[in-house]
Image (cartoon, rainbow, N blue to C red):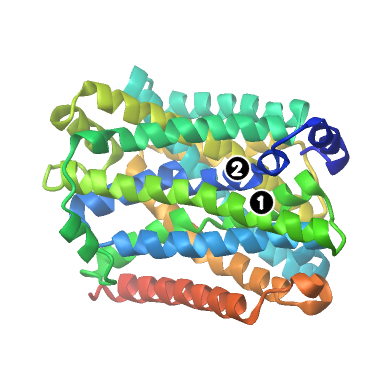
Amino acid sequence: MSTPTQQSPTRRRLPSGRSLALLGPAFVAAIAYVDPGNVAANLTAGAKYGYLLIWVLVLANAMAVLVQYLSAKLGLVSGKSLPEMLGLRLKKNNRRAFWLQAEAMAIATDLAEVIGGAIALNLLFHIPLFLGGLVTGCVSMVILSVQNRRGQRTFEFVVMGLLAIITIGFLAGLAFTHIDGGEAASGLVPSFDGTETVLLAASMLGATVMPHAIYLHSALARDRHGHIEPGPRLQRLLKITRVDVVIALVIAGGVNIGMLLLATSALRGVPGTDTIEGAHAAIENSIGPGVAIVFAVGLLASGLASTSVGCAAGAEIMHGLLAVRIPVLLRRIVTLIPALIVLGMGVDPTLALVLSQVVLSLCIPFAIIPLVRMTSDVALMGTSRNTPLTTVAAWVSAGLIVALNGALLWLTITGTG
């Protein structure tokens, strides 16, 4: 990532639109919210249960806006990322244990992204999944090299372009389907329908409130703007950051809800639509091959962008917790191996995607709880600490996540519901 010193000359050359020029870090983090894991979870939920779980996406996106803003604020005010702050505060053994769960989260993240890219290449060009995963990993190295060579701002532009492709790819089908507004509104009322819906809800939550995005956003904000001393400039940056987060995550949330609506309106009741491949085939049959191709292109963009962002997050987590910084491209090669093993074993890719999101959901509390504690700490944050209302909202969010994960574990173990 580029340093604040490298970025500041670019900002000074801008004669106007300075506030708009400061947007961008949240769009990189938002890629995590429209990754292939979202596609698998949202299509499965819509195809099987219709509008039932819309409320999960709405609630998760609202929590994501709050959490991502707190992460960016921590980076701006403290000048350190969340992993760095944890590395400073945890004892040696605790720090290593924390890194192990964070590394498991990073592997689950990369698994979803690479599998998603492999599925997209298979749908578009009939490339075998294993080879498609290898191609996805190689292309992600090219995207990461943009960050290394051209700096964070250029990387942000590349990711924002991919986000635009993702949005068009996943929402294009809605123009050719009918949405029942009344039934969709009924999905805003929280409810479940058995154990599987709890599993799906946890998967959707894990795919929406992404722990690696929480860790990374603090680093993105820090690297773009640097450590800002208390004063008018910090307050202005915090306001711009709020706008950045809201715009980016409203787009990401709209894409997620759109995918569930598309699955409900076009795929429900069609056999095999609980897999991405089956959903793609059903879209092609019911809406047309053009929309199916656009959908597959969106899935490919999602896999390429999200695996690049996930790899950058994993590198920051390792650096912050272990004080070890390895080249991000080397990490890309290492973390690609588990995904290729899964693809080579012939595991159902959609099931692997959904289960990877459950792992992410279980890891969310480890990121969000220390984030809330740190951003509420007056000694660390000064006048920028969380307001009482923000603190309550953040703790309620953390509590809901823990409760949903607890319900998931209980219902899955007992087989009840």
Question: In which quadrant of the rendered view does residue 203 lie?
Answer: bottom left
Residue on which the image places disc 2? 28
Report the front residue among 95 and 220.
220
Q: Residues within 10 Å of mark 1 (few under 14, many from 20)?
A: many
Residue projecting furthest to the top = 125
Q: Is residue 387 left or right of residue 192?
A: right
Name the disc covering residue 284, or none.
none
What x and y, as percent, mark residue 137? 56, 29
Give the quadrant of the C terminus: bottom left
Q: Is residue 277 left or right of residue 374?
A: left
Name the disc covering residue 216, or none.
1
In the image, residue 195 sits, relative to residue 48, either above or below, namely below
Q: Are marks 2 and 1 in contact (CB under 8 Å)?
A: yes
The residue sitting at 45% across, 30% down in the picture is 165
- Report the number of discs: 2
* Structural distance between the alpha carbons of marks 2 and 1: 9 Å
What x and y, as percent, mark residue 106? 59, 50
Can residue 90 be seen here? The reply is: no
SS type, badge 1? helix
The residue sitting at 79% across, 62% down in the picture is 77
What kind of residue is marked 1?
Leu
Q: Is residue 302 left or right of residue 391?
A: left
The residue sitting at 85% across, 64% down in the picture is 230
